[in-house]
Image (spheres, grey):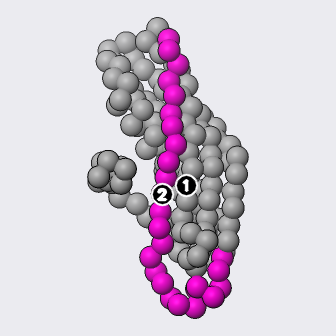
Amino acid sequence: MKYKLSKYRITESNFIFNSKEANKNEDRLSFNVSGMSSLPNDFDGIEKNKMISELKLKLGKEDERLCLEIKIICQIIINKDDNDILVKDEIERNCTELSIRMVIDVANNLLEFYQMEGISIPPIEEMQDVEDE
């Protein structure tokens, strides 16, 4: 199966730089990505389909040196071959990873514009879901 980001739209963006906190030279910021993905109900019956992901990235907090919030909607085209076995969890995981990479790219472009260090994350498998702990 092949996954391709078809288009995306930033629905909300907020950026706050707190110069008082920046002088404290604190390198760590809180980081959170949340959202949902949805597959059409009739996914099995067609060769090419779209999945929609809606994500919210939050980097930092208002009382930290930086607070960046971005909400994004991604449309991902999924091309499947006749031989492909559809596993909904696998499709959702791959599409969510692609969407997360996209929202981080958007955040990094904004941070780069303000001459700030970007976000680097490990592969999705290595991340822990804090809510599950």
Whether residue 110 is situated above or below residue 56 in the rendered picture: below
Q: Which mark is residue 32?
A: 2
Whether residue 126 is situated above or below residue 31 in the rendered picture: above
| 55 or 6, nearer to the observer | 55
Whether residue 8 is situated above or below residue 85 in the rendered picture: below
Q: Position of residue 69 (x, y in %)?
A: 62, 59
Q: Residue at x 35, y 29 (%)?
A: 89
Q: Residues within 10 Å of mark 1 (few under 14, many from 20)?
A: many
Question: Considering the numbered disc 1 on the image, is that residue within a helix, a strand or a loop?
Answer: strand
Q: Residues within 10 Å of mark 2 (few under 14, many from 20)?
A: few
Q: Residue furthest top?
A: 45
| 17 or 105, nearer to the observer | 17
Residue 105: image quadrant is: bottom right
Q: What's the residue type where badge 2 is placed?
A: Asn
Q: Can residue 123 be seen in this snapshot?
A: no
Q: Which mark is residue 117?
A: none
* Dot 1 or dot 2, earlier in sequence: 2
Magenta stretch: includes residue 94: no
